[in-house]
Image (cartoon, helix red, strand yellow):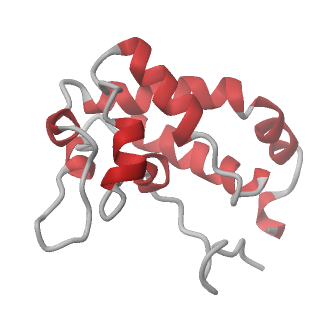
Amino acid sequence: MMLRNPFVDKDFEPNLMWFIGVFNVYDREETRGEELEVFDPDNQFDREILIVRYSLKLECLSYRHKFLLFEFLSEKLRDRSCDFQILFNIDDVYDSSWPRAEWYSLKDPRGFFEDVFRLASEEWKDDLHKASLEDQSTW
């Protein structure tokens, strides 16, 4: 048995875009875009608000999904060669856009995900603990 994706009938594959895809404002510039453009992702105070209020509010995901995402993020952070900036590079071919120019070239994209990890360990503490007590091979 494999954990399923909450939106499509496929196996759940952890991906770092789960943490930043919520900031895509394409075709929502007048709503989500205006809501998010007041935050600077390079500003530590703003970044924490963005992460807690948006990145980690993944109601569509179960505690098991969150556990797998958290473990995946941990693995990527341990990989010193992982290029986090590439996640913020949006090609014109895709229907995507960030709310502010700073998103396209963050000063410290790895630091952004380090903050996601730190804050997720606090915000998701109960879910992560619950999942850690289970045998993940049965998911």
Tell me where residue 90 sits by quadrant: bottom left
Q: Where is residue 117 in the image (x, y as percent from the top left)?
A: 53, 30
Q: Tell me what residue is drawn at x 76 percent, y 55 percent.
A: 64
Furthest toward the front, the residue is 30
Q: Which quarter of the image is occupied by the C terminus?
A: bottom right
Q: Does 5 appear above or below 67?
A: below
User: Can residue 131 be seen at all in this image of the molecule?
Assistant: yes
Near-viewer residue (99 or 121):
99
Q: Does 3 appear above or below 59?
A: below
The answer to whether 79 appears left or right of 100 in the picture is right
Q: Position of residue 83 (x, y in %)?
A: 23, 44
Tell me where residue 112 sits by quadrant: top left
Q: Tell me what residue is drawn at x 34 percent, y 52 percent.
A: 30
Tell me where residue 1 sits by quadrant: bottom right
Q: Tell me what residue is drawn at x 35 percent, y 54 percent.
A: 24
Q: Where is residue 34 in the image (x, y as percent from the top left)?
A: 35, 41
User: Can residue 23 be seen at all in this image of the molecule?
Assistant: no
The answer to whether 107 appears left or right of 24 in the picture is left
Near-viewer residue (26 or 121):
26
Furthest toward the bottom, the residue is 9
Q: Position of residue 92 (x, y in %)?
A: 11, 67
